[in-house]
Image (cartoon, helix red, strand yellow):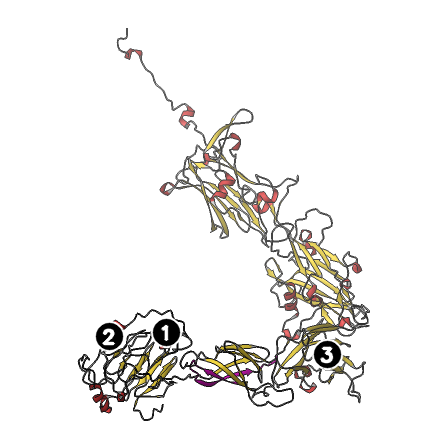
Amino acid sequence: MSLHHLPHVATVATVAGNAWARTQDGSMRLLKSGDAIYQGEVIVTTQGGRVLLELPDGSLYPVQGELLAELQQPEQENPESQSEVREVDDTAEAAPAQEGSAFSVRASEEIGGTPSFRSSSNQAEYSDEPSGYLRLKHEQDIEQIQLVEGGNSFAPAPILTVSIVGSYNEGTGSRAGGYDAFLDGRATYNPRLIEGTDLLGAEQDAFAPEIRTFDGAGDDDEYVNRLPKPLPDVAEVVEGGNTVSGNVLENDADGNGRSTVISVTYVPEPQEGEDPGDPVTEDVPADGSKTVDSLYGTLTIYSDGRWEYLSDPYEAHDAPPSDAPLQDLFAYTVKDVDGDRASSTLTIDVLDTEPSIGTPEPGVVDEDDLDPNGTDLNADDKQPEISGSLGVEKAADPLDTKFLPADEQNDLNALNLKSAGNDIEYVLLDSSHTLVGYTGKLLESGIPGQDQIVFDVTINDPTSTTPDGSTYTFTLYQQLDHPFNDGENDIDLPLEFQVLDHDGDSDTDTVVVKVIDDIPVATGNVVTSDVWEDQLDTSNSVTGYGSTGNPDGDSGETAVVKSTGLGGSAASLAALVNNGADVPPVFSVTEPDPASGLSQDQFIAAQLGPLTSDGNSLHYDVADIVVNGVVTGQTITGYVESGHATGFDDQDGVVFVLDVYRDGEWSYELKDQLDHAGAGDDEWLTIDLTGIVMMSDSDGDSYNLGALLGSNAGMFAIRVENDVPELELDGTGSVKTTGGSVNEDALTLPDDESEGNDDAEQQKVLTGDGSAGNALSLSDIVSIGADEAGSYGFTGTSSADYQSALGKLSSSEDELSYEVTEIINSSGNAAELLTASAGTGPEERIVFTLEIEKASGDWVFDLNDQLDHVVVPGEDGDEQYKLKDSDTDSATGYKESLDFSEVVGVEDGDGDSASLYDMGDTAGVFAISVENDVPALTTEASSGTATVGGAVHEDALGNDG
């Protein structure tokens, strides 16, 4: 029906979800923002939907949830409505007036809330129980009486059986023809006639809907027909046999009863080379489906609205950048239960696909595989060749893969490649599927001669029709000029190619083939020799920096090694390489790359690693070996700076000398110690000399021996055995010892903690100083060896360590505890002090101390208090005193002296440390005995002037007879 004659009462401000406006004749229109709402229309929303209306006065009015709202003209604009409202049944029950009401129905603010119904008149307001009722001829099921609220879902029917009686004025326009009985006007509500809201058991299509316009009579048979309202559908799918599906009825509004699809109209796919024909309409069987072959795919549509679309393998889209989707348009017709028909469209956008390039597989070929001149000498009559994938990812459209034109191979041209000094040019053959690099002038045929070709690369299966897709094959026929004097380097050849489909879609990428230089190769042999620090002697030193080792007495140990050509037993450096067809290589010391900014000294230091001697970093000097005016080799001198001048001079300390001769002969001499990381006499330091020696062949390939293997892999190495401190031997071959005896008799108060019975020539202090003391210094009994200088001190780390070594001793029954501290002694030198204490708190007292000077090994022992002794039987039956040890009650377990051998030791210049006991596996190397103090007669008693005694008398006894 036309709405333009009705008053405009509101405007749609916003719409969330789907919403419709239902007119009085039952037709519905889909709402969008900006639409006008006219008097008498009903707003219907889907579950959760929301419409915000803007009223003439600018205020906003929401409609949401499962609600219907009918809008009426404001009373001041519709005086007719006011008079009509007054013509009501006398049975109506009036309610208090409501001023300014603009709507006959007001929606609740909450989704699913209960609507309240009001008269548009000023005169009365009605509650949710109006005074009228609508009579339906029979009980209706949910579908017959409920509007579609989105998809195929229905909200529960608010009533099942309701009646309305009373007068009704057709002119009020307040009856919208829907199921809602309380839209406006006066009605009498009869609750006895309302059924419950539970669903009835009737089948959905058991009867047709019957909705009648109310005209005041109970038996009105005017039928209100509702028309189906199908809406357009749109979907998209990618070409190439892909599927998309949906249901055309999901967004449609049904008429009377559920709609069904009865036909589909489409444009059939034409024969190849023909233009599309006219549209064709096909019927869709009831409760069945129809499949049609359309322009760009195949559509199957079912009578219940379901559909499936399968895209064709590929389609010809427009070329980029205008490659818009192709549209397959279908028109479909629906019919409701009383035969009303309506049509809408289904549009399928068929998207284009594009080929792409993933990750091309790089390749590697080696010039040494070239026949007949390659150094692999395999004589297999085959040239080096490599194949790999180009990584082409095919889309739906046919494609072609080809190389970019020769003048567009920018990365390749930028290399300025040569072969044997001749410039390499490029040409494309076989429809750009083969790229050829050649030298010389191109023949008139445009195809290089076979002897001109340096390499070629061919694209296999350029259309990617096989499972493996497009691949390439690269073949090398002649050598490439690699950078001079750069060893076994390689050149990456960037080969640019493009994949292009029939629509003009393309992708470009680069496959890289690495060509490795042909140079002499390693034989797998190694040259390794050993030298021993034990064999060092100051007579070997050029300057006073030399050191003397502790020889083990093993035969074969030496500080000098040589190759056989110089009279030694080691192999020549020539045994390390196979130079192939080139003349024998020439050996020399590797020079640093000028671009590195390193000096010769810095380069060698970087190759050999952080070598030190007595904590000083090594420096390196290289000088030519000249014989009769001819350079026959080079000398590398490893030295430590004396500080006299920068660079090597005769005052620096030489550590080793390496001579390398041009023919591969060599010699190595160790002249001073090298610091080792580990401890022990069998610790080896490996000096890898591979990285500081290079060779050159006759065609100019020069390379470092280390670069030949990719790293310094020990092809040429010297091993240096560590030297460790040892105990000195005396003239008889016995281990030297130190120590002595102290006497408790010598203790005096107040200097000491107790007073002894001093005998003649008693002492409580011992000094270990070979030149001035009464015992040997530790340096007198230890030979540090090559790794000078040593540092002497205590090896125990806790009081328990000293109790374990010395025994659990006591003084006046108080157990001794021990502590080591760093001090500066009376001579101003660094020393370590061991303090033995007894007692606790205020009663704590020092029993003895032992001080050891670190650098010299001199020591001082001072007894400060008595030590508890026990009397045990001697070997000859006499009694003797031993130190009391609370850990044992056995006479054999008591110690005769304080044996410091296990807790006193030395560390040499490169960190080798050992206790005195460990060096000789001998106890008593450093021991101090403490003589017990015993009671004695006083001087007076000894001279007879002091006596103890007297006389007694029997007379004093009582009753003495």
Which amino acid, by three-letter code, is at mark 2?
Asn
Judge the density around disc 1: few (<14), some (14-19), many (≥20) Cα neighbours within 10 Å.
many
Does the magenta-highlighted stretch encompass residue 344? yes
- Determine whether the residue tagged by mark 3 lies in a helix, strand or loop: strand
129 is higher (above) or lower (below) than 564: below
426 is higher (above) or lower (below) than 471: below
Question: Is residue 49 toward the left or the right of residue 512 in the image?
Answer: left
**Mark 1 or mark 3, earlier in chain:** 1
Does the magenta-highlighted stretch encompass residue 578? no
Foreground mark, 1 or 2, reads 2
Q: Residue at x 52, y 34 (%)?
A: 896
Are the residues tagged 2 and 3 within 8 Å (C-beta)?
Answer: no
Front one among 592 and 51:
51
**Mark 2 or mark 3, earlier in chain:** 2
**Mark 1 or mark 2, earlier in chain:** 1
State which region is magenta.
Answer: 328-355
User: Label 1, label 3: how many angstroms apart (C-alpha)?
Assistant: 75 Å
Q: Position of residue 907 (x, y in %)?
A: 57, 51
Q: Which mark is residue 457?
A: 3
Which amino acid, by three-letter code, is at mark 3?
Val
Which residue ends up furthest to the top in the rendered image? 961
Front one among 833 and 369:
369
Which residue in the protein does label 2 denote? 190
Which residue in the protein does label 1 denote? 142
- Determine whether the residue tagged by mark 1 lies in a helix, strand or loop: helix
Kindly tell me whether residue 690 is visible in this rendering. yes
Quadrant in which residue 448 is drawn: bottom right
User: Label 2, label 3: how many angstroms apart (C-alpha)?
Assistant: 95 Å
